[in-house]
Amino acid sequence: MRILRFVGRRLLQLIPVLLGVVVLTFLLVRVLPGDPIRSILGPNATEADADAARARFGLDQPMWKQFLDYLQGLFTGDFGTSIQSGGSVGGEMALRLGPTLELVVIAVTIAVLLAIWLGIWSARRADRVGDHTVRIFALFGNSIPEFWLGLVLILVGYATLGWFPAPSGRVDPDTNLTPLTGADLVDALITGNGPAIASSAAHLVLPVLTLVIGVLAPLLRSVRASALEVLRSEAYAAAAAHGLPEKTLLRGYLRRATLVRLPSLAALVFGTALGSTVLIEYVYSWQGFGQWALRGLLYRDYPVVQASVLIIAFAYVLVFLIADVVHAWLDPRVKI
Amino acid sequence: MAALEMVPVVSGSRDGRFAKILIWTGGTILVVVALAAIFAPLLSSWGPKEIDPNGTLAAPGGEHLLGSDGNGMDVWSRVLHAARIDLGIAICAVALAVVVGTLLGMLAGYLGGWVDDGLMRIVDIFQAFPTFILALAVSALLGGGFVNLVITIAAVNAPAYARLVRAEVRTLREMQYIDAAKTSGASTIGIMWRHLLPNSLTPVRVIAPLNCGWAMLTLAGLSFLGLGVTVPTAEWGSMISLGTSDVVAGRWWTSVPPGLALLVCVLGFSLLGEGLQERAEARRR
Amino acid sequence: MTAPAGTPGREAAMTVSLLDIQDLSVVIHRPGRSVAALSNVSFTVAPGEVVGLVGESGGGKSMVARAIVGMLPNGSHATGRVGFDGADVLRMDPADLAAHRGRGAAICFQNPRGALSPTRTVGRQLIDRLVTHQKMTGDRAAESAKELFASVGIRNPGRRLEAFPHELSGGMAQRVMISLATGCAPGLLIADEPTTGLDVTLTREILRQFRHAADTDGRGVLLISHDLASIAEVCDRVVVLYAGTVVETGPAAKVLREPAHPYTRALLRSVPDVNGGRVVPTAGGMPLMTAAPHDCPFAPRCAHAGEDCRTARPETTSLTDGWSLACFHPQETALFAPQEAAPASPSDPAPLPDPQGGSSVAPGASVTADNAEQAGRVVLRVQDAHVVYRSRFGSGGHHALRGVDLELRAGETLGVVGESGCGKSTLAKLIMGLVEPSSGSVAVAGKTVGKMSRVERTRAQMVFQDPIGSLSPRRTVADSIAEPLRAAKVPADARAAKTEAALSRMELDNSILTRYPHELSGGQAQRVGIARALVGQPDLIVFDEPTSALDVTVQAQILDVIADVASDAGHGSVFISHDLATVRGFADRVVVLYLGRVVEEGPVDEVFDRPKHPYTRALLGSAPRLGESRTAEVQLVKDLDEADAATGCALAARCPFVTDTCRSQEQTLQSYGESRAACWRVPELTALIGKSA
């Protein structure tokens, strides 16, 4: 019950932050230079055409009126109409979220598991060859530009070796996959479409690998550092001095104490991964949320920008909230 | 009686040797990159924006050391010249972020109360976004150019410094020497300037080099998406972007060299940062 | 070398030694320097024997403990032999070592809260040990854990098993730590400073647990401590370490009463005594050895050292009956003149023979309390001060001080004593204006503290508990000392002159001015702290536990300095301490705090010799007394979960003489002769104690 109260209180605290985000994005997109109407009308449009278009999207209204309309829409779940495509922003967004979440969730899950295992392994061999190798690898992972890594992987995996499909989609269209969630592998699994499962999995390998290498490094460094801290702590020394067996030490005294600080970092890394997907989707022509939001930004498609910024902020703070709950569950010292 | 031979009971080095290696390697890389940037015109026969009319996508060797790109510009020369803008923006941005962030963090941490609440709510809003996405949004709205990019990257990073310094100051202000300063009649500004600032900068010194590396990656990422530095100005990210279409065709030289240069430079910052961190930890023990 | 025989009556247990350390040397190699942590250490511990390992920090006590369990730090090189049950720990293979740790020798760590794994319940941690070393399973282990908890005096053991370490108080954590170590069923139990940080009323009780382990389970016990006086009572034998060498070994009673080595004597003379005995400081500090010494390491600080001490290292020679020492000039004069232990009768602190001619810390006999009251102006007046620390969210909060009244005149020294959590430090902060009173008032030299300007605030100065932590890490000593002068806008040259004057009064060299805090020893740093407090000639100096972070001999030096400073007629001094003995040394009047209330106050001799309040009696009864073992006449209930009663007397829950009146109503301070106490039962108390005894 305490945990529910904690979640409730934290959700309440999110309201001012999200409200701030809503107001700030609404103002910034309008105040800063750039005009969405001009970009859809083309160079030959007259001033009258532009005015008509503005009226159609409600942009001729005073600012406060526009804001109230926007807020009202938000409360009814209506994100507005895209200026570029004329379609419903909510609908478009739903279609784009699946593919991106598929990438990010798979990659972050793999990275977290790998980091826990490798990080503890490395810390237990501190200052030996294995440990130094892991550290150097982590340093490289920290320093490598993901988008470039993506290109190199395409160069090797597709252009040279030909093991993986061309970076031009998420699933082979011939497999006739019925889209349900937008996450192709999930859809293929749900519909039991064998060829689609194979095709979507093959398409996922390179982008997921790129993302994993990118986000693994910070997690690995952190797990290693906190495992090392635990190993050098008085508490661990005491357990070891009392002659507890390796297995008990690892399970009872090292692992949980090490993982205590991981959740908030994992949440941070989830954010990094969200950022990286914008680049990786671009490299692999992955028609996801990042691509869509980026186009919206470039063309000053107000409703698209507002909606995507809000959804990212919401997702991000939500992930942090989950991280806090996991942290509280792992660490008895945390008062919730 | 007892034997006199030495028995090593526990072995392993926890000294600063590894830290020293890291710092030296990182430092050397950065010095080399900086020298390459300064002497770029002397090291290449082509200008960074010079177009070879009869040589687009020329393979490495021959007239172009690392080949030429789709516009017929020399890849080697551009890789060298790009170091100028990449290093320049990254360092300026981080310096700006450190100054602004530290100032805000000190005020929030020491004064507390409504100053703290207000500043931290703003920081909360900034930190409600993954940093790269925030950089993307700000630069899309603000536009490119040296100054705008510095502001963009600094703005994205400053909140993190503010939070870091604030946390540090909140710990430090509970220290006995702060009480001692107060009872010795020091003014608020005196305490901040003479006692809190020098001591709260310790973590900042470690983070800043790492952050420079991150800033370079961000800048390159923005340029890669066409939001940062644009062609014809030589910049690693935009060069990689230009080479994207060549990769599928198996032409590596337009995108691999700038990426490698970027990797090496960021690695230099990472090594330096890691070394500093290791040294700081070794000192704490 | 022969193993020393034990005290008479214990021979049976002494025949086989469990731990037999022979000529153990440990050198730690670090880049750029080596430290000879231990040099040729030899001693034994037999089953059923309690051996005290005593010395100041840097003496190598912890290194001995680490060597016994085969956990020397990185870069260590050990020579010699750590014999344990016939095997040599230094040469054990990993499997034997694993079996030896815990089952062979188990350590109770110094800082129990840090040594308990934070993410595992203490019960689980105990069961881990039982399963590993006693091959117990499931229910049997759980049952056994409960019994162990109960046996170390944990109430409600079933519930405590589910607790996490951070939920335990210091005393409770120490009990859990003892149960963890005994849960390994070790042959040898090692306790590393088991009573550091514990209140006096708990200390003896915890020490008794170790005696119990030796007597009932026949374990060998190695008790490591910096404080010879407090552990001597439970020890059979004592080993004294100095700079990594054993200087004296012998039966506890012998070493405590007739120590022959000058260092042991210095150690004992440095401990203030509750009865008002003197403290004789020994100059200097323990050297850091870079190699095994070729001379007597104590020679530079020793009054009896001759040329021989500086050229050769004294061999360990046997005196009598297992008493041995490493000294060319053993001392035979009695350390203390025979003394009657009669705390209830007026004891006059008769001047003790002072063979080493050191300066002495005696109560300010020249200025009696009455005298000062007439002569001095009032420098501090606290009236009905309450301090409530509000919790940040919602209601509640911690009521740290509840209606404290104090008055102090120039030239006078007020002692404030109490256990942790009694509000001592809050009182210090309140006086210094670092905490604002929730109600009531504080005035220094006639001015209300809250309304003072920055410069006026420097009229009150404070000397802090943590000597190095109270100096700004990136400021030089000169900067730190001159800070109050800078605030008062004293010109630079006058500042330098005053700084140097203050420094020379602290007997520090000017070369220290350009150093940074981390380059100072604890004693030097505290002298700098006192110089900073003195430099602006304040009206009031508050000493907040100024010696509790220091080693025993350094503590004696600093107490000496403070006694000198406190006797200045120009300012009043408030001396706050958990250690009654240090307060008795030089306070004129004393205030006893309990849970934010003054429970007793009065002239220092009156309060110490004729305590009125049961709490004061309990405190005094548990304070260690050199060469004397006795039980406190008032035993308080320990380790309460909720000691903060809402109504009635604050002590009600712990007091053995509690009545319904005590529970429902709080008594205010009433005069009894020269002192005042807040207790309903003062008139009947003497009779009550007589009855229960």
Image (tube, coloured by chain):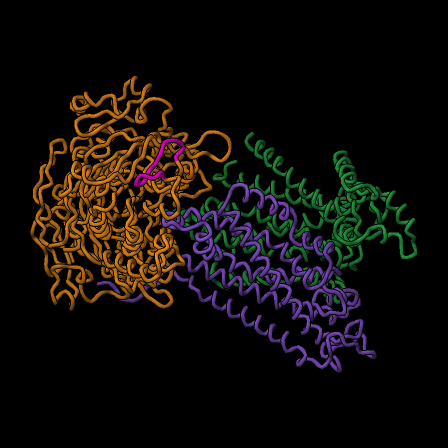
Note the chain letter of the purple one: B
Q: Quadrant of the C terminus of chain C?
A: top left
The span shown in magenta is C437-448
- Asked if residue B150 lies left or right of residue B169, the reply is right
User: Closer to the camera, B190 or A238?
Assistant: B190
One can see residue C64 in this view: no
Q: Percent from the top left, x then y, of residue C73?
A: 36, 58
One can see residue A43 in this view: yes
- Asked if residue A295 lies left or right of residue B185, the reply is right
Query: Dominant secondary structure of the magenta stretch?
Result: strand
Would residue B68 be counted in the magenta stretch? Answer: no
User: Closer to the camera, C58 or A38?
Assistant: A38
Q: Percent from the top left, x then y, of residue B37?
A: 64, 74
- Asked if residue B140 lies left or right of residue C470, the reply is right
- Asked if residue B137 lies left or right of residue C224, the reply is right
Q: Percent from the top left, x then y, of residue C400?
A: 37, 33
Note the chain letter of the green one: A
Asked which quadrant contains residue B87, the reply is bottom right
Asked which quadrant contains residue C588, the reply is top left
Q: Quadrant of the N terminus of chain C?
A: bottom left
Q: Percent from the top left, x then y, of residue B54?
A: 83, 79
User: Closer to the camera, C195 or C478?
Assistant: C478
Above or below for A143 versus C545: below
Residue at the limit of the structure toward the top, as seen here:
C660
Above or below for C502 versus C196: below
- Residue drawn at (75%, 37%) of the image: A71
In the rendering, what colour is chain C?
orange
